Image: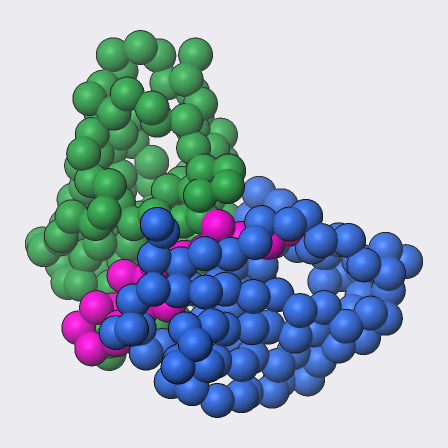
């Protein structure tokens, strides 16, 4: 079993839809949770960063972490064609682990005009 | 502009050949990382370096080697011992504060001839 599981999709939605992307994990030591967006053949870029359980909102994006269920989500409101990309969840235990992130497989999202 | 530069964008390796991927950053980050991305498997950590002249193996270091002679540079050599080198290679950097926020380069696609 992988430490982080993410539905690879692909996920196809119409413009304006609410998108829900999810990851589950098995390592209860993970404390820091991130969502990266990756356009085709480019490097990932950090979208959201959350510590421990709770919600964090940034514009159209909301990240949720439920440590009791070992489940994290990213919601995209009013989705746009420019949101079409691969979304990667990532997590780490923190402390001296630095950039030793554990990534999910990535979910491919397409938003149709 | 500050950022991470990876070169070349595409690289081809012949059987038994060693190849070196370049990674340069001008973000003044102490820590640097190499990740490998395969379809459907997310990103996996190859090597990381927290400081000049020091580096550690990640989860899949076999068949790879690195050096960190300068703060700005972290080249990755894919040796002939790496039997399945075809992948998208991503270099990243972060601040030296247990940072969980990685900044990625645009990647190098390595293929075997």
- Name the residue nearer the viewer: B97 or B22: B97
Using the rendered view, name the quadrant where residue A56 is placed: bottom right
What color was chain B assigned in the picture? green
Q: Is residue A72 magenta?
A: no
Q: Which residues are magenta?
A: A91-108
Q: Which quadrant does the C terminus of chain A fall into? A: bottom right
Position of residue B45 relative to residue A13, above or below, is above
Q: Position of residue B5 (x, y in %)?
A: 43, 50
Residue at 36 percent across and 51 percent down: it is A2
Q: Position of residue A36 (x, y in %)?
A: 52, 64
Asked if residue A27 lies left or right of residue B2, the reply is: left
Q: Depth check: B37 or B66 in front?
A: B37
Whether residue A47 appears in this view of the structure is no
Q: Residue at the spot x=77%, y=72% of the render? A: A18
- Furthest toward the right, the residue is A113
Query: Is residue A105 inside the magenta stretch?
Result: yes
What colour has chain A? blue
């Amino acid at each position: 079993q992988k430490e982080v599981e993410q539905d690879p999709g692909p996920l196809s939605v119409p413009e304006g839809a609410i998108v829900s992307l999810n990851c589950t994990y098995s390592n209860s030591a993970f404390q820091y949770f991130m969502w990266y967006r990756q356009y085709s053949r480019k490097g990932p870029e950090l979208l959201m960063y959350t510590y421990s359980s709770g919600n964090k909102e940034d514009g159209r994006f909301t990240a949720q972490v439920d440590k009791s269920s070992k489940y994290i989500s990213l919601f995209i409101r009013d989705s746009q064609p420019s949101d079409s990309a691969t979304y990667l969840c990532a997590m780490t235990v923190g402390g001296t682990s630095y950039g030793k992130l554990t990534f999910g497989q990535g979910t491919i999202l397409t938003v149709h005009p | 502009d500050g950022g991470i530069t990876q070169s070349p964008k595409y690289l081809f390796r012949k059987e038994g050949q060693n190849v070196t991927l370049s990674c340069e950053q001008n973000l003044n980050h102490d820590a640097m990382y190499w990740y490998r991305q395969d379809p459907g498997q997310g990103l996996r950590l190859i090597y990381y370096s927290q400081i000049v002249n020091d580096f550690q193996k990640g989860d899949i270091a076999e068949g790879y080697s690195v050096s960190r002679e300068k703060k700005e540079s972290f080249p990755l050599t894919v040796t002939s011992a790496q039997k399945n080198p075809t992948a998208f290679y991503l270099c990243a950097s972060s601040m030296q504060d247990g940072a969980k926020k990685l900044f990625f380069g645009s990647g190098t696609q390595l293929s075997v001839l």
